[in-house]
Amino acid sequence: MGPRRARSHVGNHLTPPMRVLVIGSGLAGINAALLASEFAAVTLISKSPLQQTNTQRAQGGIAAAITALDDPQIHARDTIRAGDGLCDPEAVRTLTTDGPAAIERLLQLGVDFDRDGQGQLALATEGAHSTARVLHAGGDQTGLHIQSALVDRLSEADVDVHTELAVTDLAIEAGRCVGVVTDQRETILADAVVLATGGAGALYQTTTNPANATGDGVALAFRAGAVVRDVEFVQFHPTALASDGNAFLISEALRGDGAVLLDAAGDRFMTRAHPDAELAPRSVVARAITETMRRDGTEHVMLDISHRDAAYLRQRFPGVYRGALERGHDITAGPIPIAPAAHYHMGGVYTDIDGRTTVRGLYAAGECASTGAHGANRVASNSLLEAAVFSTRVVTAIQRDDRPAPPPGEVRSLRSYPSGSAPSWQTLRRAMNELVGITRTAGDLRTALDRFDEWREPDDLPAEPSLPLATLTARLIAEAALQRTETRGAHLRLDFPDADCAWQRHSLWQMAVE
């Protein structure tokens, strides 16, 4: 039996419980649903099966300052250093200060993190972290363990769960979000709606994300009048196995354990690119790999960890070992080919540190939200932490009041409302890969926008209800990328190769009211 919902008594009548609607089934969505179910009637909607999330695919782990040798302030300093001038200090402080409590909650939910020989939580080092603070589970299967524990707790909770049901619009009345419209043409009403729809990596042909990570939350919020922020910042994971089919993620934890990157001549090139070499921030590593491939005329570089003991590698990285082996590569036997792939969206729906958007009644958490904690380049293993920390804060905010967050600066209006839909997923993903990818130019971005403008809105609800939303999010990314005439973090403009202090600010976008 799930937790008993609170009721308030007015005279001899019972006041119905608050209705909370959560969209998404990753760490942010399920954690919010579980917490809200303690006082509200909760509905959780997922357009896919509960296990098909970016949370489930996370390999390396979750970062938090939990030892006496570490401190949230040190964690914050590392995060800000990697964020390339765009981290919101308050959001970073919140993330790192609330981090230890988030880990404790995951332990209480049943996540079995790995432990060392003394029974203490085992910690690893990853890129841009100055000390070992990354917890992991099952070696390199942290996300699988977290997702499984969350789904188990959800099955025990008093939450109304609907899978394979897509949200096509938010219901807005008098400027307030009052529910959602689904692809079944039904409206589900709620007192509070939480967007936890995940990332946007599947807008690209080459990605580490599952096919359902199509940026729906950004488009839903934008169409409802909410402000979206920094949508141009798409992180390309430096090391995805270069093989046929979808990119297979090679965890950053391998580089934390001594893996090195080699060019076509077998030389280690990261030592020349950054003082931290392979453990530099992701944007630095991805850029160096891209420049090396362009210089050598190759489609990949090599990652080598075969100098480590084979038995140790199979035990510490079982998921990577098996996944690479299935694709014809043995990490214990020699270097493997890797190249960057779309991985994480630093931008998203603007929220304050309590998950409030600029629309009353609408909240967001996890990868679809832009808290400002990641800046222009997310630090490894901060993503799961952000999902856990800010989904908890969202539920606290829902109980406290329903005021919207004020915009944090000057907002640009997109006056030509992009209402078209790509003719197919393949067409959209190819355009994003070729024109809005890891390296960008004004010419390519304008070509992408022209192409998006040619696409028409379908006459009826399309067979793929998320495709119009995905097309809108793609257009927003391209538009914001065109406007940011500099290189910063994960945003690499070949025609503007340097950072510009005038652009050390967030980009804020809102749909114009005609």
Image: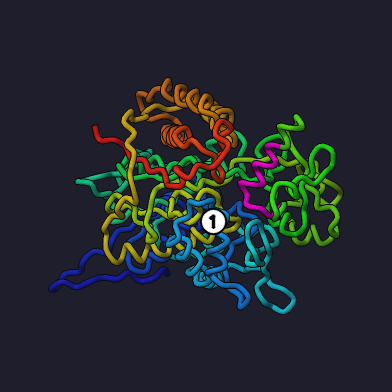
Q: Position of residue 324 (x, y in %)?
A: 76, 46
Left or right of 68 on screen, residue 330? right
Judged from this view, the residue extending furthest toward the left is: 11
- The residue that mark 1 highlights is 383
Most extreme residue toward the top is 454
Q: Residue at x 28, y 49 (%)?
A: 177
The extreme front residue here reads: 501
Res. 155 visible in picture = no
- Asked whether 80 or 229 is in front, the reply is 80
The answer to whether one can see residue 408 in this image is yes
The N terminus, quarter of image: bottom left
**Element type at marker 1?**
helix
In depth, the one of 77 and 25 nearer the eye is 77
Relative to 62, is 396 on the left or the right? left
Q: Is residue 154 magenta?
A: no
User: What's under tag 1, amino acid-wise?
Assistant: Ser
Q: Which residues are magenta?
A: 278-291
What secondary structure prevails in the magenta region?
Answer: helix
Q: Is residue 283 covered in magenta?
A: yes
Give the answer, above or below, for where 336 lies relative to 440.
below
Q: Is residue 241 left or right of residue 333?
A: left
Mark 1 nearby-residue class (10 Å; few <14, some 14–19, many ≥20): many
Percent coordinates x, y for residue 73 in the rendering: 53, 69
Q: Residue at x 76, y 47 (%)?
A: 261
Q: How is the image coloured?
A: rainbow
Q: Residue 514 is drawn in which quadrant?
A: top left
Residue shown at 28%/44% (left/top)?
171
Q: Residue 7 location in percent, x, y?
A: 26, 70
Where residue 498 sits in the image (x, y, percent)? Answer: 56, 39
Tally of marks: 1
Specify whether 323 is left or right of 67: right
